[in-house]
Amino acid sequence: MRLKISHIQYIADKIALDLGNAGFVEILTNSGDIIRIASKYLEEDISKELSIEERVRVFIDENIDDMESSGVNEKQLFFLLKKRFADESGFTLSWEDRYSNLSHEIMDELIDTSIINFRVSEIMIKNIIFKAINSYAKAYKDIEYKVIDRIKNYKKKLLVGTEEYELVFGKMYEEELRKQGFL
């Protein structure tokens, strides 16, 4: 599942929470430093993917006439071009590899900046970070659907896209994240 910029804070919070709850990790500064570092790497990763997708859209827009005349499936072409542009820029599209790389980068900076100390192998720390990212990525769609269903049954009918809808959605989304241990 593709992560969005709006997910960064929740994932970073989960990473800090999970590291703080691990009995073998000592946080030497505060969880805010973990959140800041995790957020930085998550944002860089998501921004790189968005940049690649923008390059694909520009390429498709510039070549739309040729594509229409040859009957190319735009969705398939988008995926193929995204893969090609990602390969050219050294960006990994495989979710498992991406989460693993992100986990390693986050862990390395947490160690290098003396934010955490631990009595186990680095792989265990990396796995905590990986599981936090991966569990959020797997759960967020289900959480969104639960919240949307709850809003449909809300006493007051809310229109999607209105400020009131977004406020209620955000509140319920965070409530559901809390229930599932993400906050």
Image: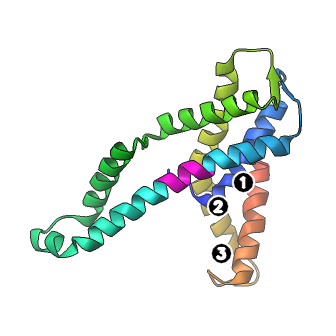
Residue 6 is tagged as 2
| Picture residue at 80% right of the left edge, 40% below the top | 17
Which SS class for mark 3? helix
| Residue at 66% across, 36% down | 106
Can residue 70 be seen at all in this image of the molecule? Answer: yes
Q: Nearer the viewer, mark 3 or mark 1?
A: 1
Q: Which mark is residue 152?
A: 3
Residue 111, image x, y percentages: 74, 27
On residue 9, which mark appears? Answer: 1
The boundaries of the magenta stretch are 43-48
Label 2 crowd (10 A; few <14 / some 14-19 / many >=20): few
Residue 14 place in picture, x, y as percent: 74, 43
Q: Kindly state the secondary structure of the residue where label 2 is placed.
A: helix
The residue sitting at 73% across, 67% down in the picture is 170
As shown in the figure, which amino acid type bears the numbered disc 1?
Answer: Gln
Tell me the distance, in whole angstroms, between the alpha carbons under discs 2 and 1: 7 Å
The reply, left or right, for residue 169 in relation to residue 114 is left
Q: Residues within 10 Å of mark 1 (few under 14, many from 20)?
A: some
Q: Tell me the chief SS of the magenta region.
A: helix
Q: Amino acid at mark 2?
A: Ser
**Labelled pair 3, 2 in contact (Cβ < 8 Å):** no
Q: Is residue 4 left or right of residue 52?
A: right
Q: Distance between the Cα atoms at labels 3 and 2?
A: 22 Å
